[in-house]
Image: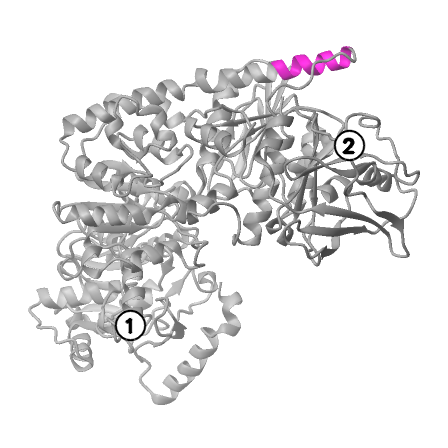
């Protein structure tokens, strides 16, 4: 698929960046890809605005993506961790006023770390528009709390997402549910609501798209994934089919492994069905638009079985095709189902999806049309261009005004947003790991924890961490690293956190121009569990400092093969209160 | 054979379709018996690349099916029936896929040689995918028959289960031991079409190797794919008249590897032995990249 920019570009006064891992309606695209394209379309008419889409998605070959004249799509063609550097380089080069990061892999993290370290040329306001993160994917899919037992890539990406959130200037989410969920999980974090338009919905003529369908035919569309809990729909439909033998559930979507078992999730669900129950279900891979059109026409309901779900795009697309939607009360569907709460199931009440399904399949066309119309109208209001594009333009205008003020003088106000606490983040690595760290992203080095020595007291869970890195004295980057690591001693404070305070060491006492002599930083100490993965040290400039030197930086020296910095860390669970206190 | 011939090409438009139609139209200009070339394709098929060919081809379109069925059986049935509906009752139909072509002159020569069989409503096919290791499995790629016979062959209701339904069911039934031999399932379009056809012709299908061979001999006439120059885009880009003859496949997860072998049509044992050897080389793993 090639990308074509329509002619007619005007000079840009405002520059918005949109970071997404996928973009446009392509084969097997995810929800964010579609709504990001719709957002760009909605922003296409804004005078003086330039939109830069930064994506790591390769250009697919199945068609042509046409974007408005004020839009540029930048495809970063690296892989794995090199994405981060390439995205950071690009964001800096584009000289943006406001960046919205709405991807699934924390692609903005390196830019944010660099910005925090003063290594970027530009300082745009960065907003993380949250989607279902890797932590949520794991927790919702397994029903467990925390990342214990999660595959490495889950843990790593979840950590990066956490770092990205902390370093960003603002957090938003496309649904009320996700916004409140994230706030509930991370004390002190404030999450605004930032929705996406859906062009199909806005363009749909209600008189044209409504189809009565068949009440006992239910369509569900989406990747088979443990967190989406299609197994719950299978269970509910089996129970309902005992009384409604005509019930037919079409499940459309590709599949991935169940993280709990490593087995293909769709097959696991199917294998749990007794053969006699198979007749109730039709399984489809993602189908052509034409074939999907037939399925939408035949169905009387669309069902999103996920107990917890962010937006979801598939539900809005179903509304645009004349289908009313059944979904969890803990999902974005609840945002436009206020007048028809009977379509929402309570994810925490066992069997509630069955109750809703049982109600749905006996409803005649009149009730279904009423439900659909209510959801359709509410969603159109919520996801209109005005409701979705206008606030973004206002945010870019505010950011541009601040950028102008910064140029004009030193008294510019700080960046807005709940996360603007001056965070510091290091991401170190366990022994033997080859994964890069956030610090190495920033510094261009591979930092490794070369040893973690358990100090053998499980109650205190001390560990001695030696960070080594190849370099030579005098290297400017080395000075940066010393600034980062060496300016502080570690000092104990309450709640499992320690502070880093300035340290009288000529070799390390380097001034980065921003933090010398200022308030000490706070380290949110990783849990013992974290040491099995990249260690997260959130270094937060704040008012928690309580002087002390319980855990001093014990060593920093040059060796034949490089430098090492020895840190001693207290390994305890993070205190929930710490972040709350340091947030403004 | 004195009947008029319609070439019915069905399927999505692929880069190879231009070649398929060009070959058919070229032969139509040379042999007055070929009076029509019909392309049955989907509503959303992009036929622009076919350019001026469209002036000489009758294009029929249909919306995609909601359920393509196992190995696209429902799609195949829909488009072939769409095409057959436009063919006069007394025509002979050469049914071809959009990604294949044939030496039409050679094909019609073979039909001339066996005109009596054609008149007896025998369905002509090739040895390409007419399998010896599956029962009731004549190839459904290139089919030639009088229009009424072919209409009966494709008089099959839409199968309700999806490809994925069948794949998942077979995988699970194999795991549970509920299926001893996947050959007994007759899921493949070839078998579903042929067995339904046999029943409509009044045959009591006994599902044995002997009955399968008997029905194939009675109701089908097998042509050697190489004799009629069958080419397939999927293999060597259709540049060479080479189609699979011996190969391995494992279509079902947890199922057996099938050592597929097509029905011999070469006549002499020596020629067949050469074909066997050549087949093993051409369709073996060593040439996989070259084939694609």
Examine the rendered structure and indicate whether residue B272 appears above or below residue B12.
below
Q: CA distance from mark 1 to mark 2?
A: 84 Å
Which labelled disc corresponds to residue B171? Answer: none
Position of A389 relative to B21 (above/below): above
Give the percent coordinates (x, y) of residue A460. 66, 49
| Up/down of A405 relative to B285, above or below | above
Q: Residues within 10 Å of mark 1 (few under 14, many from 20)?
A: many
Q: Which residues are magenta?
A: A398-408
Furthest toward the left, the residue is: B202
* Residue that appears at 47% across and 39% down: A63
Residue A548 percent across, percent down from the top left: 78, 35
Residue A437 at what x, y percent from top left? 70, 46
Q: Nearer the viewer, residue B66 or A373?
A: A373
Name the chain under label 2.
A
Marks 1 and 2: which is nearer the front? 2
Asked if labels 2 and 1 touch by Cβ distance under 8 angstroms, the answer is: no
- Residue B130 marker: 1
Q: Chain of mark 1?
A: B
Prevailing secondary structure of the magenta residues = helix
Is residue A389 found left or right of B229 in the rendered image? right
Magenta highlight on residue A223: no
Give the number of the disc on residue A547.
2
- Regarding residue B36, the answer to whether it shows in the image is no
Residue B123 shows in the view: yes
> A76 left or right of A365?
right
Quarter of the view holding residue B48: top left
Element on which disc 2 rests: loop
């Amino acid at each position: 698929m090639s990308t074509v920019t329509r002619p007619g570009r005007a000079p840009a006064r405002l520059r918005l960046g949109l970071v997404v891992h996928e973009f446009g309606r392509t084969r097997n695209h995810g929800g964010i890809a579609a709504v990001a394209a719709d957002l760009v379309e909605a922003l296409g008419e804004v005078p003086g605005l330039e939109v830069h889409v930064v994506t790591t998605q390769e250009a697919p070959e199945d068609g042509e993506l046409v974007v408005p004249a004020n839009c540029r799509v930048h495809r970063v063609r690296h892989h794995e961790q090199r994405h981060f550097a390439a995205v950071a380089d690009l964001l800096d080069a584009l000289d943006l006023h406001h960046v919205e990061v709405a991807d699934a892999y924390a692609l903005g993290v390196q830019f944010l770390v660099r910005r925090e370290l003063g290594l970027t040329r530009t300082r745009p306001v960065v907003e993380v528009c949250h989607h279902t993160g890797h932590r949520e994917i794991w927790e919702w899919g397994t029903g467990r709390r925390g990342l214990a037992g999660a595959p490495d890539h889950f843990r790593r990406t979840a950590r990066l997402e956490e770092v990205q959130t902390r370093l960003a200037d603002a957090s938003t989410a496309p649904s009320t549910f996700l916004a409140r969920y994230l706030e509930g999980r991370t004390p002190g974090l404030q999450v605004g609501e930032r929705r996406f338009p859906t062009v199909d919905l806005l363009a749909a003529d209600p008189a044209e798209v409504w189809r009565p369908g068949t009440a006992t035919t239910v369509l569900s569309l989406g990747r088979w994934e443990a967190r989406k809990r299609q197994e719950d729909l299978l269970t509910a439909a089996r129970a309902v089919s005992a009384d409604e033998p005509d019930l037919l559930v079409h499940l459309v979507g590709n599949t991935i492994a169940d993280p709990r078992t490593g087995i293909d999730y769709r097959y696991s669900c199917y294998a749990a069905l007794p053969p006699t129950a198979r007749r109730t279900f039709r399984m489809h891979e993602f189908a052509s638009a034409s074939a999907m059109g037939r399925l939408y026409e035949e169905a009387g309901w669309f069902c999103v079985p996920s107990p917890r779900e962010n937006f979801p795009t598939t539900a809005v697309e179903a509304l645009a095709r004349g289908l009313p939607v059944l979904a969890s009360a803990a999902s974005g569907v609840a945002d436009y189902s206020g007048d028809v709460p009977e379509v929402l199931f309570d994810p925490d009440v066992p069997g509630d999806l069955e109750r809703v399904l049982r109600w749905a399949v006996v409803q005649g066309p009149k009730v279904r049309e009423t439900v659909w119309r209510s959801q359709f109208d509410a969603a159109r209001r919520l996801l209109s261009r005005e409701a979705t594009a206008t606030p973004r333009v206002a945010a870019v205008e505010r950011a541009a005004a601040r950028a102008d003020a910064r140029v004009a003088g030193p008294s510019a106000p700080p960046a807005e947003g709940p996360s603007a606490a001056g965070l510091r983040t290091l991401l170190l690595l366990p022994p033997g790991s080859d994964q890069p760290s956030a610090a190495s992203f920033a510094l261009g080095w591979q930092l490794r924890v070369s040893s973690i020595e358990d100090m053998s007291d499980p109650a205190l869970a001390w560990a001695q961490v030696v960070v080594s890195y190849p370099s030579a004295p005098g290297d400017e980057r080395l000075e940066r690293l010393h600034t980062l690591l060496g300016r502080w001693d570690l000092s104990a404070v309450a709640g499992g956190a320690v502070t880093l305070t300035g340290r009288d060491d000529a070799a390390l006492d380097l001034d980065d121009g921003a933090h010398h002599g200022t308030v000490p930083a706070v380290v949110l100490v990783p849990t013992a569990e974290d040491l099995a993965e990249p260690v997260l040290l959130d270094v937060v400039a704040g008012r928690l400092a309580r002087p002390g030197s319980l855990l001093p930086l014990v060593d920093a020296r040059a060796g034949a093969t490089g430098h090492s910095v020895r840190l001693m860390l207290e390994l305890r669970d993070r205190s929930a209160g710490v972040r709350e206190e340091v947030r403004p | 054979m004195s009947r008029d011939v319609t070439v019915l090409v069905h399927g999505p438009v692929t880069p190879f379709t231009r070649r398929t139609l060009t070959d058919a139209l070229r032969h139509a200009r040379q042999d007055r018996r070929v009076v029509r070339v019909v392309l049955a394709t989907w509503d959303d098929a992009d036929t622009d690349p076919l350019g001026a060919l469209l002036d000489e081809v009758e294009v029929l379109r249909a919306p995609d099916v909601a359920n393509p069925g196992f190995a696209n059986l429902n799609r195949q049935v829909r488009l072939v029936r769409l095409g057959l509906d436009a063919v006069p009752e007394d025509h002979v139909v050469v049914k071809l896929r959009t990604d294949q072509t044939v030496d039409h002159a050679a094909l019609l020569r073979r039909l001339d040689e066996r005109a009596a069989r054609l008149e007896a409503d025998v369905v002509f096919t090739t040895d390409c995918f007419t399998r010896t290791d599956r029962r009731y499995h004549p190839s459904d790629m290139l089919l030639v028959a009088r229009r009424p016979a072919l209409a009966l062959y494709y008089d099959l209701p839409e199968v309700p289960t999806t490809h994925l339904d069948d794949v998942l069911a077979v995988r699970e039934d194999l795991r549970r031991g509920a299926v001893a031999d996947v050959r007994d399932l007759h899921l493949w379009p070839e078998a579903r079409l042929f067995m339904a056809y046999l029943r409509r012709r009044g045959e009591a299908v006994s599902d044995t190797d002997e009955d399968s061979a008997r029905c194939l001999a009675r109701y089908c006439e097998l042509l050697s794919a190489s004799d009629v120059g069958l080419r397939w885009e999927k293999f060597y880009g259709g540049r060479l008249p080479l189609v699979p003859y011996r190969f391995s496949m494992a279509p079902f997860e947890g199922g057996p590897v099938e050592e597929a072998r097509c029905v011999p049509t070469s006549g002499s044992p020596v020629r067949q032995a050469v074909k066997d050897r050549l087949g093993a080389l051409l369709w073996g793993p060593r040439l996989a990249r070259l084939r694609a």
